[in-house]
Structures are given as structure tokens and as C-alpha cells.
């Protein structure tokens, strides 16, 4: 046999070391167990002292042990598979012996159900609801513990700080934030802003679950999300019960009172001072104004638009929007130290939005508490928040600044202009330096000229490096800039497109119609907004106009040649997430299948702010605003004469709302709008119609309507929570 070379010997030693590491990892716990039990090998005797040592294995023994371990692992896997097969019930249900995962009647035990559910692929919607339910349970336990801790240690009155942290992406991929941090002061309200998909809601959830920030255990936190997941117990409760139950301190005192009274009734000795003495349970309940809790909860729900009939319904009979309203009322009633709200205005009327803004801004309850809000409603943000937390998706950075949202937006626009000007001047200087350096000996061949050209070249390189370093900062500043949208229209049409003459409507079985005697005419120059409380009939009126419903009274005339297109708050949900924007448009408008038709669709998408580079990206890879643009492109492609917008801003960010307002203002057709967004309504609407009190009446202007709603609020007493 030829002698081994150094290279072969080195490879052999590396293989031995790798095998030794694997064996060490697998046998470490087993080795410790054998040592504790005295080992199975013979002890080595030295000077009459017995010592337990492991025998050093040879190379062949190590290989044999590795093969044995591998065989044991495979045997365990085979045994587990056989056990799983044996546990499964047979096809026939009678006379069957069931495995450990099933009960006597063949039903899966809870643990087996959980295992099966885990094995089944979970949809995104199911995952969101499951995670929200888990978070709700976690937050409820934390609130209870915080109240108990506060009763023992006293209230925490300091600021909430978050030292440097990173925010992971729940969908996988790179972190949403890197090296972020913030400081939240008591008595301040913060607007959390940024583009869709940058991580605002994820950050809010992380705050709520105490995964970021140093939140002391005696600080109560209440979080209201856009998705509500309710337990079976909560589904059976009324909205009033849910709101009252949110007062954790009162709930714990009632439980303690009932336990003490029950123990006394059983003849057991109790602490009478704790029940009836000074600062006892009964006195604390009296201080909390416990007797008026029902009245205060009812008034709170009424301010958020709940009628008496709605307040009497169980939560299971309410739609998602009304459930979110209930959770919002519960959070306010619970008066937490930290109130975290994710798009709280989405399901509110303008009147309810105005009330909520006043409640959070002027109620003494919130003077020493912290509020953090995510909202697309800039009027609401300006009214409520005096500080801004901005999330940059490009820079993965969280920036904190003092001042309202409008102040921040103005300051940021100035930064964008100044930075863009700096970049422009620097790039012009680079071009000038390169031109000089590239002329060769045009300016002479002396050594001084050559040195000057080299110096200019080095200056250009240095400026290019500086430009490259600041490219990310420029991109971060420009991420707020929205591409313009252009909606195609069918052009002008002579006369009225829709006419309502003495129209009334009532659903079958209802005691009274929603409204009667509606007189309304719409042409291709109309810009009308329908306002009123939820449930008064705004959406029903839209359905009557578009022909989705027929009136129970009066007559509706529609011009048959006119096209009407509808955009609602769920318009982006119609997209197949696996399709690209171009594929989606082709599925809706196949045309003749030629390249010319594809080019036409591409041009239309481009006009709608979906550039060529995005037209080949599947919808799951697009932001919410980009999906909204694709859906609007489909609506616009039919060239409607009348555009119906039913809460179109709910899933958009602040910049997308502004871009949509610009687009609708330029639209050369009629517009019918239902919206709670004061900024959007103010930009778009020229006529205001109010659906209220069983009638549809024209208001003088949106500003006058808003002023009237504010005057109504002045007559509504504030509900000051007892601390």
C-alpha cells in the first residue's frame, strides 16, 4: 500500500473530528445518564479508589456507534408511524376499537384535534384571527395582573422607553425595523404613520404584547385592532356587557366581594375590615361609581352610533364593523395607561369620528395616559395627536418628532425638496468634473494640467461615493411620493343619468321604511356625498341608484346608455393574489388576445400608477396601495360615466388617500361618494346629502354639516371615568 500523503492524512483527521462532534452531540445526555447510574462498563481501580470513566473509543468503534445511533433513530420513526396508523379509526363506526387519540364514541380528543388542525394548511385569514385571539387572551391576562400589581405597588407614572430593538417581519423576510427606539411620555398622543406594508400594525401589536419597550408590569395596556376575534362567551354577551366587563379593577373587586359574602354565608371566618372597613372592597366600589356603570357604558355606546336595539343584540348577531366599535368603546371605558388604536375610524360615521376625537383630546381621563394611533384620517390625527412616530419601510427606521401630523408632513416636504436640490447640484458637479477630467490634453499637456485633471477625477469619484451613500436616504424621503392616477371616463352625457322621484325604501318585515320621499338627480358633473349615521340607509340608497335594489315607493330613472362603476372598501380584495396586474386585467378584459390589446392594457395600468416593472409582480408581492390601483384600473377601463365610491379610503394609507382625491377631482364624470374621511370628502364633494330621520335632505355644505355635528357634541356631556 502506498504511504498516505499529508493531504490524505489531513482529510482523514477532519473526517474523524466531524464524526466525533456528531457523536458528542448525540451521546452527551446519554453519557451523563450512564455516569449518574454507575455506567455499564467496568470501573478502573487505582490505589484502592474507584473512579467512573468512559472508555476511549477507537475509530472503528466510533463508526459502529454512529451506525447504531442512526438505526435507533430510524426504528423510532417507524414505530411512531405505526402507532399513528394504529390510532386511526376504521371506516365503519360500529364495533371499532379506537386509538388513544379518540374517545369511546370515535370523536377526536382535543389534543388530537389540535394536532390535526396544525397539520392542515392554515389560510392567511385563519392565521390572522388565531393570532389575534391569542393576543387578546395574552393582553387580558396582562391587564388583570397589572391591576393586581398596581394595587400592591402603586401606579407607575414614568415614561415608557424602548431601547434599541429590531422588528421582525411576521410574514418572513428581512426585519421591518432595525436599530429602532422610542420614548413615550404620559399625557401625550402619538400618531404612528408610514406607507402600507412598512410595519405600523406589526409595531403596534409588538407594543401591546410588551415584546418591545420596557413596560412595567403595573401598567395596563388596551389594544384595538382592525380584526376582532371573540370567544364563545363574548359572542353571547351584549355590547353593554362587553364594555362594562372592560373595567378590570371593578371586575376584580366584584369577584372579591362575592367571594367574601359567599364565604360568610357558609359560616367561614372572613376579614370584615377587608369587606366593609375603610378602603375596603365596598368602599372602593363606591369610589368607582359602580352603581352608574350601566348608564356610563350605554352613553358611551350611543356616542359611537349604537341604537337601543343594537345595544340589546348579542355580539354574535353584530357585523364585524359593529364588533370593532364595541371593542373601541370597551377600550375607552377600561381607561388603560396605554391605549393603542389601529385604524379606529374605519367603521365610524363622521359624527362618531368627531366625538372620538373630542373624547381623546379633551376628556381629563386621558391627561396622564399614553395614546398611540394608526389612522389614514389626517383630520383625526391632527385633532388627537401632538407627536408623530414615522416608520420608513425603505430605511427600516423609526423616527420620533413633536408636532401634529400636518406639521410633520410640511417639514418632511421641505426636507424632500432640500435633499432633492442637494442631490441635483451634486450630480451636476459630478458631470462637470467628469467632463473636465475626460478631455485628455485638450487644455494642454503640461504636468500641471495633467495633475489638475487627475484631481478633478478624484473629486468626481469622491462625490459619487457620497451620492451612493445618500441614495438610501433619498429613497427613504421619496417613499411618501405617490405616482399620479388617471381614471378614464365615458365623457359627458346630456341630461340626468340617474333620477330619484319620491323614492322610499323599507326592508321586508321592518316596522318602518328607512326613508321616504327622496328627490335627487345626478349627471356627469355631479360630485355628491351621502352622510349620516351607520344604519340610516346610505348604502341602501347607493344600491337603489345603481339598480341593485328596487324602491318600495316612488320611481327611479336611469339612462340605459350610461355606464356606472362601483369602488368600495373591499375593491382590492377581488384580486387573485397569484395573478400579476397584467394577468388580472387580461382575465377581466380578454379582448382579441393580440399583442396590441396587451399593449393597451399595459398603457392603462401605467396611467393608473402601476409601472411596467410592477405589472409582472404577483398581487401577493404588491402593497395594499398598489393592489388598490390595480382594482381601480379595472373599474376605470370600462370608462364609466358615473363613479360610485363607497368608503374607498378604508384600506389606504395617507399618501394613497391624497392621490385618490387628486384622481377623483380630475375624473371627467359624475361621482357619488360615501365616506367618513373628512379630508377626502372636503376634497371631492360639491353637494352634501344627509340620510337621517327617515328622509334624504340636502345640506348647505360639508363645512356647515361638520359645524352642526360639532354643535351637537357640545350638548353631549363627557363621560369622565372614575380613576
Image (cartoon, rainbow, N blue to C red):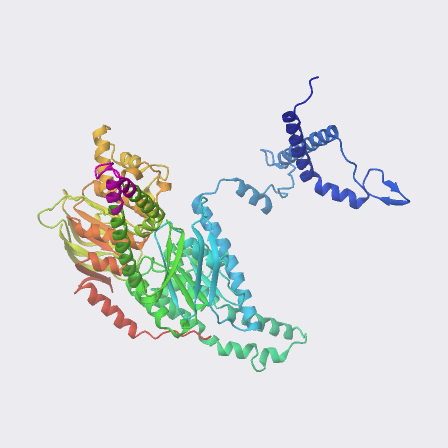
Residue 533 visible in image: no
Q: Give the residue at the far right of this rendering.
A: 48
Where residue 200 sits: x, y (%)? 40, 54
Based on the picture, tell me whether residue 448 belongs to the magenta stretch: yes
Q: Give the residue at the far bottom of this rendering.
A: 278
Displayed quadrant of residue 313: bottom left
Q: Give the residue at the far left of this rendering.
A: 494
Compared with 454, 287 (above or below) is below
Report the front residue among 410 and 314.
410
Report the front residue among 37 and 682.
37
The overriding secondary structure of the stretch rendered in magenta is: helix
Where residue 57 sits: x, y (%)? 76, 33
Q: How many marks?
A: 0
Residue, x 65% and y 36% (percent of image)? Answer: 80
Residue, x 13% and y 52% (percent of image)? Answer: 525
Q: Give the residue at the far top of this rendering.
A: 1
Where's the N terminus, which quadrant? top right
Based on the picture, tell me whether residue 555 belongs to the magenta stretch: no
Compared with 279, 111 (above or below) is above
Residue 123 visible in image: yes
Report the front residue among 215 and 481.
481
Where residue 222 sits: x, y (%)? 46, 63
Where residue 367 sits: x, y (%)? 40, 73
Give left or right: position of 542 versus 281: left
Displayed quadrant of residue 578: top left
Compared with 488, 718 (above or below) is below
Q: Which residues are magenta?
A: 429-452
Amino acid at each position: 500500500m502506498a504511504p498516505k500523503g499529508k493531504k490524505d492524512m489531513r482529510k482523514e483527521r477532519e473526517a474523524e473530528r466531524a464524526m466525533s462532534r456528531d457523536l458528542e452531540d448525540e451521546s452527551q445526555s446519554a453519557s451523563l445518564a450512564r455516569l449518574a447510574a454507575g455506567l455499564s462498563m467496568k470501573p478502573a481501580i487505582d490505589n484502592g479508589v474507584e473512579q467512573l470513566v468512559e472508555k476511549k473509543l477507537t475509530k472503528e468503534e466510533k463508526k459502529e456507534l454512529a451506525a447504531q445511533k442512526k438505526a435507533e433513530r430510524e426504528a423510532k420513526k417507524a414505530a411512531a408511524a405505526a402507532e399513528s396508523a394504529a390510532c386511526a379509526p376504521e371506516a365503519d363506526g360500529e364495533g371499532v376499537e379506537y386509538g388513544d387519540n379518540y374517545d369511546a364514541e370515535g370523536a377526536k380528543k382535543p389534543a388530537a384535534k389540535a394536532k390535526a388542525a396544525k397539520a392542515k394548511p392554515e389560510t392567511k385569514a385563519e392565521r390572522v384571527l388565531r393570532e389575534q385571539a391569542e393576543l387578546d387572551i395574552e393582553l387580558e391576562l396582562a391587564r388583570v395582573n397589572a391591576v393586581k400589581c398596581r394595587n400592591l405597588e402603586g401606579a407607575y407614572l414614568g415614561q415608557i422607553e424602548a431601547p434599541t430593538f429590531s422588528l421582525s417581519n411576521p410574514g418572513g423576510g428581512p426585519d421591518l425595523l432595525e436599530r429602532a427606539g422610542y420614548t413615550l411620555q404620559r399625557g401625550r398622543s402619538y400618531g404612528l404613520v408610514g406607507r402600507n406594508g412598512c410595519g405600523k400594525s406589526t409595531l403596534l401589536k409588538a407594543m401591546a404584547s410588551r415584546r418591545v419597550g420596557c413596560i412595567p408590569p403595573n401598567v395596563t395596556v388596551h389594544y384595538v385592532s382592525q380584526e376582532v376575534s371573540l370567544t364563545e362567551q363574548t359572542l353571547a354577551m351584549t355590547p353593554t356587557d362587553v364594555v362594562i366587563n372592560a373595567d378590570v379593577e371593578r371586575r376584580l373587586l366584584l369577584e372579591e366581594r362575592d367571594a367574601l359574602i359567599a364565604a360568610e354565608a357558609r359560616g367561614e371566618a372572613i376579614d370584615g375590615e377587608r369587606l366593609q372597613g375603610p378602603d375596603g372592597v365596598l368602599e372602593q366600589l363606591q369610589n368607582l361609581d359602580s352603581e352608574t356603570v350601566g348608564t356610563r357604558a350605554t352613553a358611551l355606546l350611543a356616542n359611537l352610533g349604537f341604537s337601543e336595539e343594537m345595544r340589546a343584540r348579542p355580539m354574535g348577531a353584530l357585523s364585524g364593523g359593529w364588533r370593532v366599535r364595541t371593542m373601541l368603546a370597551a377600550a375607552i371605558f377600561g381607561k388603560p395607561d396605554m391605549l393603542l388604536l389601529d385604524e379606529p375610524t374605519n367603521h365610524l360615521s363622521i359624527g362618531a369620528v368627531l366625538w372620538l376625537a373630542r373624547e381623546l383630546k379633551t376628556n381629563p381621563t386621558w391627561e396622564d395616559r399614553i395614546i398611540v394611533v394608526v389612522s389614514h384620517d389626517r383630520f383625526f390625527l391632527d385633532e388627537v395627536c401632538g407627536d408623530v412616530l414615522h416608520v420608513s419601510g425603505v430605511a427600516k427606521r423609526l423616527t420620533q418628532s413633536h408636532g401634529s401630523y400636518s406639521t410633520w408632513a410640511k417639514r418632511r416636504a421641505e426636507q424632500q425638496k432640500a435633499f432633492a436640490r442637494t442631490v441635483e447640484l451634486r450630480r451636476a458637479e459630478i458631470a462637470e468634473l467628469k467632463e473636465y477630467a475626460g478631455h485628455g490634453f485638450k487644455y494642454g499637456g503640461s504636468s500641471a494640467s495633467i495633475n489638475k485633471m487627475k484631481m478633478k477625477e478624484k473629486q468626481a469619484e469622491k462625490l459619487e461615493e457620497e451620492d451612493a451613500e445618500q441614495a438610501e436616504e433619498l429613497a427613504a424621503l421619496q417613499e411618501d411620493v405617490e405616482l399620479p392616477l388617471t381614471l378614464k371616463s365615458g365623457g359627458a352625457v346630456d341630461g340626468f343619468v340617474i333620477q330619484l322621484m319620491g323614492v322610499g325604501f323599507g326592508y321586508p318585515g321592518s316596522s318602518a321604511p328607512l326613508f321616504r320621499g327622496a328627490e335627487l338627480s345626478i349627471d356627469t358633473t355631479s360630485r355628491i356625498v351621502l352622510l349620516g349615521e351607520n344604519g340610516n340607509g346610505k348604502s341602501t340608497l347607493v344600491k337603489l341608484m345603481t339598480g341593485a335594489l328596487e324602491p318600495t315607493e316612488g320611481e327611479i330613472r336611469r339612462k340605459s346608455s350610461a355606464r356606472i362603476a362601483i369602488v368600495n372598501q373591499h375593491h382590492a380584495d377581488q384580486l387573485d393574489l397569484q395573478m400579476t396586474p397584467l394577468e388580472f386585467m387580461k382575465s377581466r378584459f380578454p379582448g382579441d388576445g393580440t399583442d396590441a390589446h396587451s399593449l393597451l392594457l399595459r398603457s392603462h395600468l401605467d396611467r393608473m400608477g402601476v409601472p411596467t416593472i410592477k405589472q409582472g409582480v404577483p398581487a401577493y408581492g404588491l402593497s395594499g396601495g398598489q393592489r388598490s390601483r390595480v382594482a381601480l384600473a379595472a373599474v376605470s377601463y370600462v370608462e364609466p360615466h358615473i363613479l360610485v365610491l363607497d368608503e374607498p379610503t378604508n384600506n389606504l394609507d395617507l399618501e394613497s388617500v391624497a392621490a385618490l382625491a387628486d384622481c377623483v377631482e380630475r375624473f371627467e364624470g359624475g361621482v357619488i361618494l360615501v365616506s367618513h374621511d373628512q379630508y377626502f370628502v372636503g376634497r371631492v364633494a360639491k353637494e352634501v346629502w344627509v340620510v337621517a330621520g327617515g328622509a334624504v335632505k340636502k345640506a348647505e355644505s360639508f363645512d356647515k354639516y361638520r359645524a352642526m355635528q360639532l354643535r351637537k357634541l357640545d350638548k353631549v356631556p363627557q363621560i369622565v371615568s372614575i380613576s
